[in-house]
Amino acid sequence: EVQLQASGGGLVQAGGSLRLSCAASGFTVGDFSIGWFRQAPGKEREGVALIASGDGSKFYADSVKGRFTISSDNAKNTVYLQMNSLRPEDTAVYFCAAAAYRIVGVPIDREFDYFGQGTQVTVSS
């Protein structure tokens, strides 16, 4: 059974950093495309970052490019989202998702087969 467990959210001041983790079970992260999404209150879910299956190519939304970094640790079967220079507008529930095929570009939720539960990130000004 494919499962995704996101963690690492919290409250941080603007300019601070957080690292989110997405622990996977039931599959090997390197064989799947893994995306991070976020959803702020009253807004649609948006794709933030993606690491593609196979060659591990990485893609970012323009709003986070240069501040967020997605990475994977195959030994731990975990994907991370390092978030630096956080802004109040980054406040949202963050989700990780998996797809059993290669995806490229900024992730779109309809492309993904599995979603984990979210973790809340709150950035105070």
Image (tube, rainbow, N blue to C red):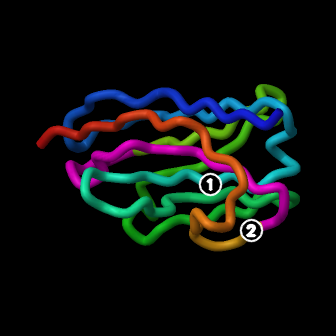
Q: Nearer the viewer, residue 117 or 50?
A: 117
Residue holding disc 1: 35
Which quadrant would residue 67 be assigned to in this image? Answer: bottom left
Would you say 109 lies left or right of 74 here? left
Is residue 44 positioned above or below 67 on the image? below
Q: Residue at (87%, 58%) from the top-left corner?
A: 54
Q: Residue at (67%, 35%) from the top-left corner?
A: 4
Q: Give, as a single range, the part of the protein colored magenta.
A: 84-102
Q: Residue at (25%, 57%) from the top-left corner?
A: 42
C-alpha separation, residue under disc 1 versus residue under disc 2: 9 Å
SS at circle 2: loop
**Tag 1: amino acid:** Gly
Counting residues from the start of the chain, the first of labels 1 and 2 encountered is 1
Would you say 4 lies left or right of 17 here? right
Would you say 83 lies left or right of 52 here? left
In the rendered image, residue 114, in percent from the top left (x then y), is placed at: 69, 48
SS at circle 1: strand
Is residue 3 positioned above or below 111 on the image? above
Q: Nearer the viewer, residue 108 or 123?
A: 108
Q: Residues within 10 Å of mark 2 (few under 14, many from 20)?
A: many
